[in-house]
Each structure stands twice: as C-alpha cells, then as structure tokens.
Amino acid sequence: MEMDQLSPGSLFSLAVATTILLWFVLRQALSGGKDTGAKLPPGPWNLPIIGSLHHLVIGTRLPPHRALLRLSRRHGPLMLVRLGEVPKVIVSTPEAAMEVLKTNDLTFATRPSGPTLDIVSSGGRGLVFAPYGEHWRQMRKVCVVEVLSARQVRRIESIKQDEVARLLESVAEASTASPAATVDVGERLVRLTNNVIARAAFGGECRQQEAYLRELARMSTLVGGFSLVDLFPSSRLVRWLSSAAGDVRRSHARVQRILGDIIRERQEKKPNADSAAAAARDDEDLLDVLLRLHKEDALSFPLTPEIISAVIFDIFGAATDTTAATIEWAMAELIGNPHAMAKAKLEVRQRLGVHHRRSVVTSADLSDLHYLRMAIKETLRLHPPIPMINRACQEDCQVMGYDIPKGTAVMINAFAVGMDPAHWGEEAVEFRPERFEEMGTEYGWQVPQMEFIPFGAGRRQCPGALLATTTIELVLANLLYYFDWAIPGGAAPETLDMGEVFGIIVRTRSSLFLQAVAACHLQDH
Ligand code: HEM
C-alpha cells in the first residue's frame, strides 16, 4: 500500500482508520486542553488527528508550498498550522522572514528533527541538518574555509568547463542526428552537476554514480517533511502502514555504503600521503581535504570517516539537484517566454561575438550578461528549488507580537516571500526578468528587505550561493550561445508542462524535452 505521500487518498484512509478514536479525542478537547496563556499565531481551523492537513489537500492539487501560500493569504504572514500532530509556524512574507531570519537569527538558527530527516542527517552528524551548536559551527567553518576555499573554487572552475564542454558535445550530437534527437534537458543537467561535484569531491567520477543518483532522488521526494511518518511521528499505526522511513533508511544505507567504499579506497591508496605536501598541491580534492583534517586531528570534533561521509553526502545533496533544477526551470521559463529567450540569446551572442574562439564560454566571459543574470534571479524567485526552508525555535520568543514556544518547527516559505504582491506587484506570477532592473542595478542575490531569499538568510544561509550562481550562468550562457532551442514538433510554448514535483527540492513534473539546433560551430575541445 502506498501511504507515504500527502494525498487525498492517503488522508482519507488515515481518517477512516482513526475515526473510532475521534470521540475520545473530542471528549478530551471539549474537557479543555491546557491553556498556557500564550498568544499563538493565527491559523486555519483544525480537525482532530489530521490537524490542518485537509486545508492542504481537499479541493486543491497544489503542492504544499503553493497551498500554504494560499492559506497564508487568509490567515496572515505568520501562521500556525498543525500538519498531522506536528505544529509548524509558516512564514510567508518578507517582513515575517525578516523577524525570523534577521531579528531573531540566533533563536531560529537550528533545524527541526523528524523521523526521515533524522535518518538522512545521520543523526545530525553532517552539516545541512545539524542542530545549531559546536559541531555545526565546526562543520560550517570546514565547508566555507576548506571545501569552498579560493583554491577549491579554482579547481572546480576547470572541472565545470570540462563538463560543460561534454554537455555541449552531447547536445551537438543530438542536434545533428537524423532525424534530430530530442534532448532530455533535466537528465543532462543532473548528470553535469553530479559529475562536477563527484569530480570535485573524489577526483574522478564515482563508479557507482547511477545507483548513487537513484537513491538520492528517492530520498529527496520522501524527505520533504510531508511523508506520513513525519506528520505523525509518534503513531505506531502510521509507522506500520508507511514504508517511507524504511525506504529512506535503505536508500541512506546504500548511499553511505558507496561513500564508505570510496573513502576506504582512498585511505588504502594514500595511507602515508604527506598531508602538508598534499595540501600545497592544487589537485587536492574535497575528500583529500577532509582526510587531511582527519589526520591532522586539530579539530575539537574529530572528523571520523562517518562524519566525512555525512558531510560529503550533505554537500552532494545541497549542491547538485538544486543547481540542475534551477537551470532546467530557467530553460523552461525562457522557452515559455519567447520574448525573454530572444533577449537573453541576443545578449549572450552580442557580448561574446560570433567568432568566439574557445570551445566553451568560460566564467571570464560572463561579467556583462546582465539580462541573463536577471533571468536567473527571476527563475529563483518563481521556482526556488528549496521553497520551504526548515528551521526550529531554540528558545521561547516573540515574532510579530505572537509567542513562539521553544522547539516549534518553523518553515519559511521562500516561494511565498517571492510572490508577495506588496514587493513584487500584482503580476508577481509572471516571468519578467526586467523587474530586477526596475528595482535598481544594485538589486543583488542578497537583498536587505528579505523579499528574495532563494538561498535563505542569516547564519544558516546557503554557503554555496556563489558556486551555484556562477555554475548556472556558465551553463545557460553556453546553451544559449551555441544552440537555438524549441519544443519538439513545433508545439506552442503554452503547452509546456510547468507542474512541480514536491520534495526537499522541487523539480519539474515532466522531463523537459527540447530540440536543439546549432546556432554556431562548436570547435573541438
Ligand atoms: C541554486 C542552487 C542552490 C540553492 C537554491 C540553495 C538553497 C539553499 C537554502 C535555501 C538553504 C537553507 C538556508 C537557510 O536555512 O537559511 C541552503 C543551505 C545549504 N546549502 Fe545551498 N543552495 C544551492 C546550492 C548549493 C551549493 C552549490 C552548495 C555547495 C556547497 C550548497 C551548500 C549548502 C549547505 C552546506 C547548506 C547548509 C548550511 C547550514 O545549514 O549551515 N548549496 N541552500
């Protein structure tokens, strides 16, 4: 029985199974729950057992971030919903985000826990889901200072160019086939971002990459916080009915086995590597860096192989699908908006000239591509790949005049924030990159008023934003410079499926299949 994803069917089954308990629950409710006197945020009315879930599924087929945006328009920028048995505060406007991510940055600097999250976070031993504290501080520093150091970024730059060249060659091959083959854009992009991170992390490509990717994708859809086990963490009935926790555990174990093999092989290959000499070399990959830190043993929390594996897993998860999904959404939006596509293409081709001699447009060529950059921002505003940013409250506090008790899970709806009509106007749903120009040339990736937060904000904000945005620019510039793109069969742009699959990362519902026609000759690499 497939009970795991939030759907009307699964909720109905659950409601029937629990109806017999309703009377007792109602009796308890009528006899009066404890009134703590706290002034909690407003929210929709709740049903026993399922809480507010019916508002998210009945009469709507919207994914959670969209359904929650709709609810917030009725109940306010700070809203308390009960997702099953878990109360969550939903933050939906820039003003509310400002209070959580800036005014109370430290109070909300931790992540919530939950059955599936606890599994993928290896019990908080990695970085992305680690609870706030010394371990997180250390791992964040390792990530920023060592993993994303200037030297590593330089190394990754040449890997990116190499992988982009491979992508272009494979697209060129499809475009010259007879009849011309369609390109599964999403699949190629996931491959590209995975190859980049795999080569950055392990030097070579991961031999078990296919299996690794399959398990990562499976986990992403199960760990969005809307699996039944996460909604009813204390229910034995749900645990019995649901396979989500077991599926996540199995996928996670497989991924950890693959990573464990890679780490062991590396340790066996370079058992006596002189760490200082290795550090001085430019070819030290992320695994070398982490193993060197393990050997130096100078950190307060020793980097055990388990922690190294958890951190690499986190960086893979954080860096690959987010970047690939953004490029895919950008291509979908540009195809769906021919006027924007024409402008972006013209800019790339005019700025780079027709006689671009290198086989790949490099990062050095990207500085003047203002329209393309705005198109990427607009894509991230409309399709933040992580629309629901998970945080938790570390101590009792007040936000917008409401009491938030310690331990409350908080979801910042980055999608809703980017849709706020007070900042983005009534036509906020439209893809219009020019709006960023109208808001001022300085309107950057980080904005002071929190109306654009695809990378989060505050001390837990994404440390990979620069790596991500430069990769997205590089790939898009190349795709638009070398090819003209169209929907196969000449279908109209409106026919493009812009539906979403919800998970920890939101992706396009249907693969984006496009036809590419070479716009200029791709020189041999
Ligand atoms: C388009 C691409 C990306 C998007 C939209 C994105 C978005 C995000 C968001 C929303 C968060 C949570 C921030 C918060 O809680 O305030 C996050 C965290 C994180 N991201 Fe990214 N990210 C992207 C790419 C990357 C890349 C390339 C890396 C590579 C290292 C990365 C590494 C991380 C890490 C390590 C965290 C956890 C930080 C912490 O908890 O301290 N991300 N990202």
Image: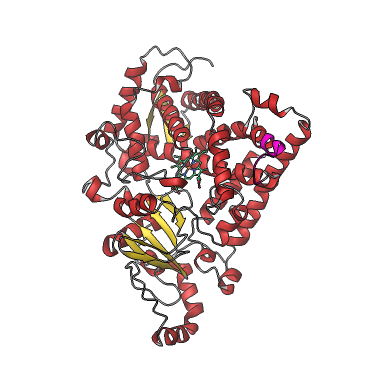
Residue found at x 42% / y 80%: 34
Estimate the x, y position of residue 269 in percent, counting from the top left: 77, 31
Is residue 514 one of those drawn in magenta?
no
Query: Closest to the observer: 36 or 222?
Result: 36
For the N terminus, the image quarter is bottom right
Q: Is residue 232 visible?
A: yes
Q: Which residues are magenta?
A: 292-301
Residue 491 visible in the picture:
no
Q: Quadrant of the C terminus?
A: top right
Q: Nearer the viewer, residue 443 or 430?
A: 443
Residue 212, how many percent across, how many down? 63, 44
Give the x, y percent position of residue 508: 43, 46
Q: Does residue 282 appear left or right of residue 459 in this picture?
A: right
Question: Where is 280 relative to 95, above or below?
Answer: above
Tell me which residue sits at (44%, 16%) in the image. 521
Above or below for 492 versus 351: below
Which percent across, then down, holds residue 276?
A: 69, 27
Q: How is the image coloured?
A: secondary structure
Q: Is residue 295 shown in magenta?
A: yes
* Left or right, 147 with reference to 384: right
